[in-house]
Image: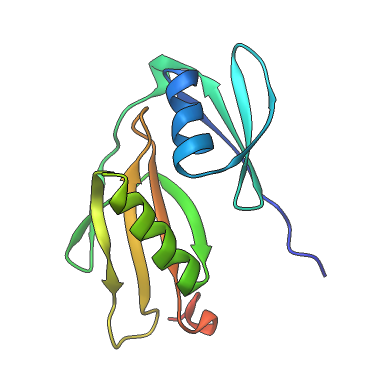
Amino acid sequence: MTTPVFHLALPVDDLEKAEAFYGDLLQCERGRRSDQWIDFNFFGHQLVTHLAPEECGRTATNTVDGENVPVKHFGVVLEPAEWEKLARRLSDAGVAFIIEPGIRFKGEPGEQGTFFLLDPAGNALEFKCFQNMDQLFAA
């Protein structure tokens, strides 16, 4: 069975900044667009940034493995080499991580590489990797 592709629509307060972040920085292919929204190929998934400034802003956090993780966030699970390459590229570009690239749950079920950053509208993104994908849903 083919893995389903998710569709996510999120608010932004500036389409030009969203295009620079998702299109240029994250290198997501651009799709259809209007003066109110832009489609992106977000690592094989459909992401739509909708102009809605009143909906933008940071969310609450919960403590996870000693870090303040934004409750409202989205992201992708990448292969370890791709995750490392992206983390290095973003770091070299001077991106301000809200949680720096590192290993969470080291030596425990669900051990994973992770980092968090904000888009220009304050939407939180998480990028993860697992050395063993069987650990993705580990209890």
Residue that lies at the very extreme toward the top in this rendered image: 35
Q: In the figure, is residue 117 to the left or right of 49?
A: left
Q: Which colour scheme is used?
A: rainbow
**Residue 96 falls in which quadrant of the image?**
top left
Residue that lies at the very extreme toward the right in this rendered image: 1
**Residue 72 falls in which quadrant of the image?**
top left
The residue positioned 54% from the left and 84% from the top of the image is 134
| Percent x, y of residue 100 | 24, 58
Q: Name the foreground residue: 81 vs 46.
A: 81
Residue that lies at the very extreme toward the bottom in this rendered image: 107
Residue 113, relative to residue 25: is it above or below? below
- Residue 22 seen: yes
The residue positioned 48% from the left and 17% from the top of the image is 52
The residue positioned 41% from the left and 18% from the top of the image is 13
The residue positioned 45% from the left and 76% from the top of the image is 130
| Percent x, y of residue 21 | 44, 34
Q: In the figure, is residue 2 to the left or right of 53?
A: right
Residue 56, relative to residue 116: is it above or below? above
| Percent x, y of residue 129 | 45, 70
**Quadrant into which the C terminus falls:** bottom left
